[in-house]
Image (tube, grey):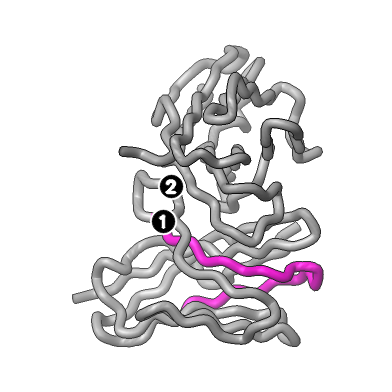
Amino acid sequence: DQQVKQNSPSLSVQEGRISILNCDYTNSMFDYFLWYKKYPAEGPTFLISISSIKDKNEDGRFTVFLNKSAKHLSLHIVPSQPGDSAVYFCAATGNNDMRFGAGTRLTVKP
Amino acid sequence: DTAVSQTPKYLVTQMGNDKSIKCEQNLGHDTMYWYKQDSKKFLKIMFSYNNKELIINETVPNRFSPKSPDKAHLNLHINSLELGDSAVYFCASSQGGGPSLPGELFFGEGSRLTVL
């Protein structure tokens, strides 16, 4: 059961533009959401998170938006840089459970 | 100085063999985990363990067993390997928590297991 879905397996963006990565979830018990970034041959690393009591969290070039009614969150990266090219995993936690999406591969072209 | 390290990074073995993947964390974290990244790229939790409690994902076959000699180590033993066990296995750790946690996980680099 795919409780966390990232429907776009890949995304290509020009350097300097905005990257928007999307994530949908189905379990209303999830109350904390995280984004992880993964380079090839490395483990995922934590990027940014948001609690369900908020609808936005910003950290430098990275902003996560949460729409609880739509059970949707998105990660915005602006401006995008070539070093941002990686696979981005969305994760959702709550009720003693944590689920990951399948990831979106972001390619930022110079 | 790697925070979460796992060995080996690559493991190729025959069906029916028994193998282990080791994991060590030097972060002083309380809880360690094993995740399997399946063929569809989903990261699925297999176990979470702190020094008091082992939580097993009920979908994990009992051929898989975690062994924790101390708080800094959580090794994964797999008996009677099957073709479907081929995957990348990630170890992770966190301060406090269990399968659901408000903080962040620190992952190892992954161990790619190929069963022939």
Q: Residue at x 61, y 58 (%)?
A: A100
B52, A36: nearer the viewer? B52
Q: Residue furthest top?
A: B17
Disc 2 crowd rating (10 Å Cα; few below 14, some 14-19, many 20+) is: many
Q: Inspect the magenta stretch and tell me whether residue A35 lies in it.
A: yes
Question: Separation of disc 2 and disc 1 at Cα?
Answer: 6 Å
- The residue stretch that appears in magenta: A20-38
Against B71, is A22 above or below?
Answer: below
Disc 2 marks which amino acid? Gly
Q: Mark 2 lies on which chain?
A: A
Callout 2 and callout 1 share a chain = yes
Disc 1 marks which amino acid? Lys
Q: Name the residue under label 2.
A: A43
Q: How many marks?
A: 2
The x, y position of residue A23, in whole percent, is 59, 74
Q: Mark 1 points at which residue?
A: A38
